[in-house]
Image (cartoon, rainbow, N blue to C red):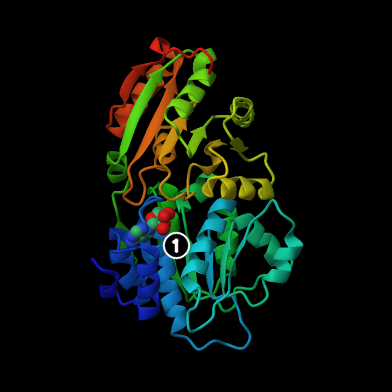
Amino acid sequence: MPFSNLGLSSSFLDKLAQLGYEKAYPIQQQAIPAILKGKDILGIAQTGSGKTASFVLPILELLQTQKPSKNRHIKVLVLVPTRELAIQVNEVFQVFSKDLPVKLKSMAVYGGVSINPQMISLQGVEILVATPGRLLELQENKAFSAAELQILVLDEADKMLNLGFREEMDRIFALLPKKRQNLLFSATLSPDLESINKNLLHEPVIVQVEEEKKNLDLIKQFVYLISEEKKGPLLRYIIKTGKMEQVLVFTSSVHKADTVADKLNKNGIKAVAIHSKKSQQARIQALENFKAGRTTALVATDIIARGIDIKFLPFVINYELPRSPKDFIHRIGRTGRAEASGEAISLVTPEEAQHFKVIQKKMGKVATQIDGNDLNLHGY
Ligand code: AMP
């Protein structure tokens, strides 16, 4: 369906065309008209489904129709589970609000960095994207007021609950005006989430899209059976012989991410590790360099498996398997997005083989198997 059928004004249609968004994705087809009508939304959708634009576009459209007030106040609050997602969602707001007739100011706030500059920059912000903990800190410092709030968005609500944000979220809900529009997005529906839905949403329009399966069909999957001590040389062999220029490598611990990145660098493959022990600035820099093609390999723990959007990422390598099949799907979902195909490669030791079987069963997909021990890894 073209975007022109959804009730968006021409300033957005031109921008969508410039960005190469030719047709609206299913979640956008369903959510945009409902949000424009002022309805609450319960969206069951994964990253990669186009869910960000499905709320950003109608929110900006709604704000465009309002007279700009002299004293700008926060009208839209988007709660997200991680700093990376906060930055990314804010970027989407900024891309779509650039050059609009009514100027709108948006900002991302998150913990792990000094609060003072955020308090100063909050002046005049109308759209705030925040992680729950930092939002409460700002409120305690009297830098955040929700008196004029019109729209609340919970993005990746299931992840926020998994990360233990329930209490913070309840404290935030208590600060908000009763009359408002609520948009809740989640990859899954858990009983905990049900209770939030019941208390928060008013006759929501339910939007559900099956994204994971569709994504998986676009991903070519390979599994290399290999011993633990040969994983390093095999990784370098795969990157070098595959002439990979942009590859996301997953490990299951911070320490492993650092050592794998170190070894890659020592062997002439530009790599950088990204994980929770790195400073926020270092994480932003690492992602920027990777997106811009200045680093070949980004070695990551699961912290960035969700939510990070890297357009057309061609390769994902699981140096180690994650514990849950869900995390596996989220990891490999970083490739094969936005209808582009990608390749996911897993390095599996005999000890991990049974666990990999379980993952494949849950996915309903079987990876092409290669015996890494048959390869000549000498010199890698
Ligand atoms: P999201 O699920 O919001 O993380 O979006 C996934 C990716 O799809 C992002 O790179 C978006 O820029 C892209 N995208 C979203 N909607 C469309 C569309 N209608 N056409 C093409 N790309 C899109």
Q: 198 or 168, which is in the foreground?
A: 168
Determine the quadrant in which ligand 1 lies: bottom left
In the depicted structure, whether residue 113 falls above or below residue 226: below
Q: Position of residue 150 (x, y in %)?
A: 50, 76
Mark 1 lies within 8 Å of ligand 1 (Cβ measured): no
Q: 67 or 247, which is in the foreground?
A: 247
Residue at image point 39% right, 68% down: 18
Judge from the rendering whether residue 178 lies leftward or rightward of residue 190; answer left or right. Answer: right
Task: Determine if residue 346 is in view.
Answer: yes
In the depicted structure, whether residue 232 falls above or below residue 86: above
**Three-letter residue code for mark 1:** Asn
Q: 274 or 139, which is in the foreground?
A: 274
The local crowd at label 1, few if under 14, some if 14 to 19, many if 20 or more residues have their Cα within 10 Å, is few
In the depicted structure, whether residue 267 falls above or below residue 378: below
Q: Position of residue 35 (x, y in %)?
A: 37, 72
The image quarter containing residue 336 is top left
Judge from the rendering whether residue 215 lies leftward or rightward of residue 294; answer left or right. Answer: left
Q: Residue furthest left?
A: 1
Q: Position of residue 131 (x, y in %)?
A: 59, 56
Task: Determine if residue 323 is in view.
Answer: no
The image quarter containing residue 369 is top left
Q: Position of residue 220 (x, y in %)?
A: 31, 34
Residue bearing mark 1:
199
Q: In what quadrant of the picture does the N terminus appear?
A: bottom left
Secondary element type, mark 1: helix
Q: 135 or 196, which is in the foreground?
A: 135
